[in-house]
Image (cartoon, grey):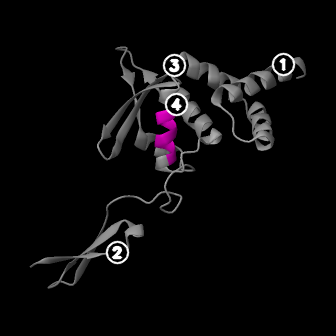
């Protein structure tokens, strides 16, 4: 019995193994397709993804009774946040680490990212999420971003702080 490898178009990220005597076709998925139907991440930060990831970190990360961090892995985020592609989540986590909003261990190879372990929110991460947590505040930030276009994370945080203060003055 000699298996034959028959490729399916590359966009499907699959290969078919055909075993002649049994006419058995096995399909093995090699890599999952992104939500964007195979399009690569365009390296644009999505503020909604940033907020969702930071809220997930705040809700799910723990320090156990032995004082050991219990990290979240990239697949944990992908499962709990299905609105975002694996590439978008990985890229956003990478940049949140660069910006010192989260503490991570990124496992890389020559070909890219293997996994990302998120251990904790930093003080900056807590400050940021505190300024944008409220849904009414987030809606105002999104309205402002629709007018302004893209802005940096510190500007989003400033907008959030401004809208929080506004809500406190006029509840």
Is residue 46 depicted above or below 24 in this figure? above
| 163 relative to 35 in the view: left or right | right
Residue drawn 80% across and 35% down?
Answer: 140
**Disc 3: which residue:** 122
Residue drawn 14% across and 85% down?
Answer: 21
Please report whichever mark, 4 or 1, sits nearer to the chain's N-terminal start. 4
Structural distance between the alpha carbons of marks 4 and 2: 37 Å
Structural distance between the alpha carbons of marks 4 and 1: 29 Å
Quadrant occupied by the N terminus: bottom left
- The question of residue 89 being in magenta is answered with yes
Callout 3 touching callout 4 (CB < 8 Å): no
Structural distance between the alpha carbons of marks 2 and 1: 58 Å
Structural distance between the alpha carbons of marks 3 and 1: 26 Å
Quarter location, residue 7: bottom left
- Crowding at dot 1, Cα within 10 Å, few <14 / some 14-19 / many 20+, comes out as few
**Disc 2: which residue:** 8
The extreme left residue here reads: 1
**Disc 4: which residue:** 96
Please report whichever mark, 2 or 1, sits nearer to the chain's N-terminal start. 2
Is residue 12 depicted above or below 19 in this figure? above
Structural distance between the alpha carbons of marks 3 and 2: 45 Å
**Disc 1: which residue:** 168
Note whether residue 73 is visible: yes
Quarter location, residue 142: top right
The span picked out in magenta is 88-95
Q: Main secondary structure of the magenta part?
A: helix
**SS type, badge 2:** loop
Is residue 109 depicted above or below 8 in this figure? above
Please report whichever mark, 4 or 2, sits nearer to the chain's N-terminal start. 2
- The question of residue 51 being in magenta is answered with no
């Amino acid at each position: 019995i000699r298996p034959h490898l028959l490729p399916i178009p590359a966009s499907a990220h699959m290969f078919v193994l055909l075993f002649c005597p049994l006419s058995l076709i096995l399909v093995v998925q090699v890599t999952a397709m992104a939500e964007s139907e195979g399009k690569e991440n365009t390296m644009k930060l999505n503020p909604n993804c940033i907020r969702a990831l930071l809220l997930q970190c705040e809700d799910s990360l723990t320090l156990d009774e032995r004082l050991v961090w219990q990290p979240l892995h990239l697949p944990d985020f992908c499962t709990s946040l299905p609105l975002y592609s694996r590439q978008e989540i990985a890229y956003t986590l990478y940049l949140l680490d660069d910006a010192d909003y989260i503490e991570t261990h990124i496992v890389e190879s020559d070909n890219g990212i293997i996994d990302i372990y998120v251990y904790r929110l930093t003080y900056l991460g807590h400050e940021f999420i505190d300024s944008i947590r409220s849904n009414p505040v987030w809606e105002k930030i999104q309205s402002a971003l629709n007018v302004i276009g893209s802005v940096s994370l510190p500007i989003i945080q400033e907008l959030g702080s401004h809208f929080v203060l506004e809500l406190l003055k006029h509840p």
